[in-house]
Amino acid sequence: MTIMFKKQRPGPPDAETGHQRVRITDLDAGYPGRPVLRQLTADIRALTMTALVGPNGSGKSTLLGVLAGVIDATSGQLRYAEGRPPAFIPQRGAVGDALPLTALQTVEMGRWGERGLWRRLTRQDRAVVDSAMERLGVADLAARQLGELSGGQRQRVLIAQGLAQQSDLLLLDEPTTGLDPEARERITVLLADLVADGTTVVQATHDLEAARAADTCLLLSDGRLAGQGPPEQVLTVTALSRIWQPA
């Protein structure tokens, strides 16, 4: 499965967007007969890690889909600062085990948006793919089938596919869910390194440890913004207990 993205015509930087990579204003979005996001207003700061936190059904994945351009907003506004189209990395479970793809072929799909589905990759494309695989430590897995990889290996291959798009905005849906502690820590460190190198990272996560490593958290509840700011201010015991009420 290729990472999906939507080409955008970014507006020029101005005083309104400032250091925001994305400005979200009064956003409503959802599916036919099922609204999800309601009047959501938030900022995604450039060159930071933003964690989208909330229980199942709170709107995390829907917000990622809207940011990626694969889900249409029904009202409101998204304003992107100047930059390349975002790279969207879905949950590992969205990539079937039965797909006859090697790790290398999976990462090469990250160049399809630039090159086109049927055109051969250029030498420069292959250099970008090789660099992404080296960066994520999966170059030695190039010939392995995707379905043969461990959860952590597969997640790093998918992130390498995102890097191959050469976007400065990386969107990830539950990148550490289902991984063992060592793999979760490795992914968290890799994402922090990407931010340090100039990438804006947004991840939806249930992993509060990963969320606390972010620069900013957006706490979602029932499609609305319940909190925004540094993790130590947003992920308080009081706020979390209010959001995750026992059934």
Image: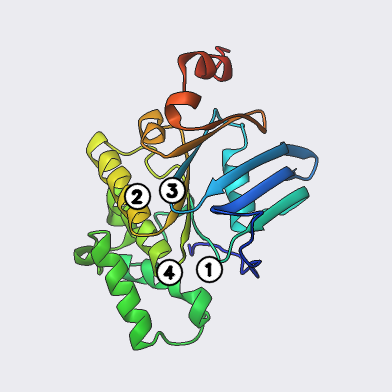
| Foreground pick, 210 / 95 | 210
Q: CA distance from mark 2 to mark 4?
A: 15 Å
What residue type is disc 4 on? Gln
What residue sits 30% from the left and 63% below the top? 145
Q: Position of residue 164 (x, y in %)?
A: 39, 69
Q: Residues within 10 Å of mark 3 (few under 14, many from 20)?
A: many
Type of residue at label 1?
Answer: Arg
Query: What distance separates the C-alpha of mark 1 from that of mark 4?
Result: 8 Å
Q: Residues within 10 Å of mark 4 (few under 14, many from 20)?
A: many
CB under 8 Å between discs 1 and 4: yes
Of residues 69 and 25, the one drawn nearer to the viewer in this rendering: 25
**Residue carrying label 1:** 84
Q: Which residue is mark 2?
A: 191
The answer to which of marks 1 and 2 sits earlier in the sequence is: 1
In the shown orientation, is residue 120 left or right of residue 55?
A: left
Evaluate whether residue 70 shows in this view: no
Q: Amino acid at mark 2?
A: Leu
Which residue lies under the disc numbered 4? 166
Residue at 30% in and 79% down:
127
